[in-house]
Every structure is written in C-alpha cells, then in structure tokens.
Amino acid sequence: MNLLAVFLFFLIAGTGLAMTSLTGDLLSLYLALSVSALALAATKMANQWEKAVVLRLGRFHQLAGPGLFFVIPVVDSIASWVDHRVTVTPFTAEQTLTKDTVPVDVDAVLFWQVWDAQKAALEVKEYQKAVSWAAQTALRDIIGRTLLSEMLADREKIDHELRKVIDDKTEPWGISVQSVEIRDVLIPANLQDAMSREAQAERERKARIILGTAETEIALKFAEAAKAYEGNPMALQLRAMNILYEGLKEKGALVVVPSTAVETMGLGTITGLSALAKDSGLNSKE
C-alpha cells in the first residue's frame, strides 16, 4: 500500500460517485469502485534502494523497482522487498577457546550488501538471520585456530580471513561481504593480571640488559682512557686536578684529599689546595 495507490483509489471512486450523482446511473458507481479497487491493488512503488521480487502464480516473474510499477492482482504477488544498501550487523562469540585454550569474548561488526535480490529472496529463508549466524560460526572457527597473542597483535589479518570465510558462505545467496571489523577482545581478569606482570617483567629484563650494555661500554671507554694516560703522567695530573676542581665548584664544600693524591697531582701543600678552593668560591660567586 502506498500513497499514490490510495490517491488513485479515491480519485476514481470520487469520479464514479460524481457521475452517479449527475446521471443517477448506479452502474457507473459500481464500475468506478471496481476500477479503483484494481488500481489500489495493482499500483506499487519501490524506493531507490529497494527491489521487489514478483511471483506470478507462485513462480518467479521479475524484479521490479525502484520507482512505480504495476502487478496483476490475484495473479501476481510480491514475495519480498529487498534492501540493496550496505547493512551493518553486530555479532559476538562468547566464551570461545583460542588455539592455546584461552577463553575469550569477541565483539565484531559485519558490513554486507545484497547484490542479487532474486537469490537472496529465493535461495535462503530470512537471509538477514542467515548472514548473522554464518558470521558467528565463522568467528568461532577462526578463534579456535588462532593463538591469543596473534589475535591481539594482528587483528587486520584476522579481519581479512574472517571476511573471506563469511563471503564464501554468503556468495551463493547473492550477498557480498564488504568488510569485517573486530571491535574488542575480552579476556579473563586473572589472565589480564598475569599478562600485565609478564609485560612488566619483560620491561625490567630489557632495562637491565640496556644498563649492563651501558656499563660494558663505559668500562671499555675507561680502559681506552687508562691506556692514553699510561704513557703521559702530566695529562693524568691535569685530569685529576680538573676532577677535584669540578667537585669543589659544584658542591662548594670541604673535600678531604689524601696526601698521596695531593703529591701525585703536584699541589705540594695544603695551602695550594686552599687557594684552589678559594678560587673556586670566587668563580662561583661571579
């Protein structure tokens, strides 16, 4: 039933009623009512995204629409109206075991479209439900063949494989799968804690390895520096004086240095050390 058919019904019936009132002929009224009833039953209209599957005496006759079309009342019937737009169907797989026997809950979304209205209407009953159940079955099968780590790390690969499996099932029904997207993968809380501890331990292990590597590189550099100072006592004295000066400059406190170290650096007496400290203080004030 559509507005155009209703309009034609009232137009024809009103015309017949007007003619009857003018002529007094009831036959015109009966004829107008009959024609208006036929027009109401025969006039159909499909939207731009729809196709009507028309059966004639129970057998497939044609795909009608979009737009205005007519059927023969009683002889023709419309089996179904098929929507050709992309349809979004959410589906889930609850408490499904992965390949490494981990129970997971997976939420996914399926994007599909009817490309052959005749097959969708005649080859499968309630094709919307059929697509949903096919998607759930395929998802459970993919989860059972996939490790948890692969599922969490490479969703695009699983999406592609899942789309191919579902599309192979729905293609004989005149339905194509545009894409499949896994929205969320839920794992048990205790397993989440265990994975978090494992990740933290892995990060600590890497940090220790990096620290050990740095210590090794520092030791090698010190060894190279020792070889450079080994044959040059003057350079070693200057380096020792520089280390002591930097300590006094940064900290600004009294530093106790063994006499042997003072003699090694060639400072001679405590007076020289005090002068160095005073010079450091004056430089810091400036």
Image: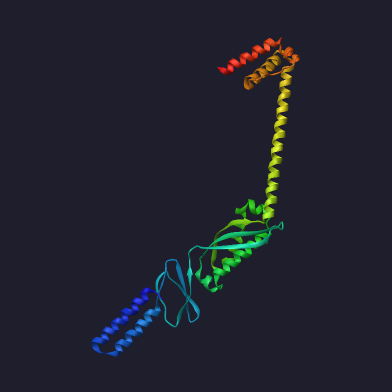
Image coordinates for residue 80, horizontal then vertical, percent: 49, 74
Furthest toward the left, the residue is: 22
Q: Residue at point 37% right, 76% down?
A: 5
Q: Quadrant of residue 253?
A: top right
Q: Residue at point 62% right, 56% down?
A: 185
User: Which image quadrant: the N terminus?
Assistant: bottom left
Furthest toward the right, the residue is: 260
Q: Quadrant of residue 146?
A: bottom right
User: Which image quadrant: the C terminus?
Assistant: top right
Image coordinates for residue 215, horizontal then vertical, percent: 71, 31
Q: Residue at point 35% right, 81% down?
A: 36
Furthest toward the front, the residue is: 254
Q: How is the image coloured?
A: rainbow
Image coordinates for residue 181, horizontal then vertical, percent: 57, 57
Q: Quadrant of residue 222?
A: top right
Image coordinates for residue 282, horizontal then vertical, percent: 59, 15
**120 sits left or right of 194 in the view:** left
Pick the front one: 206 or 157: 206
Using the image, determine if residue 119 lies above or below residue 210: below
Using the image, determine if residue 29 lies above or below residue 226: below
Using the image, determine if residue 15 lies above or below residue 130: below
**283 sits left or right of 192 in the view:** left
Pick the front one: 69 or 277: 277
- Count of numbered marks: 0
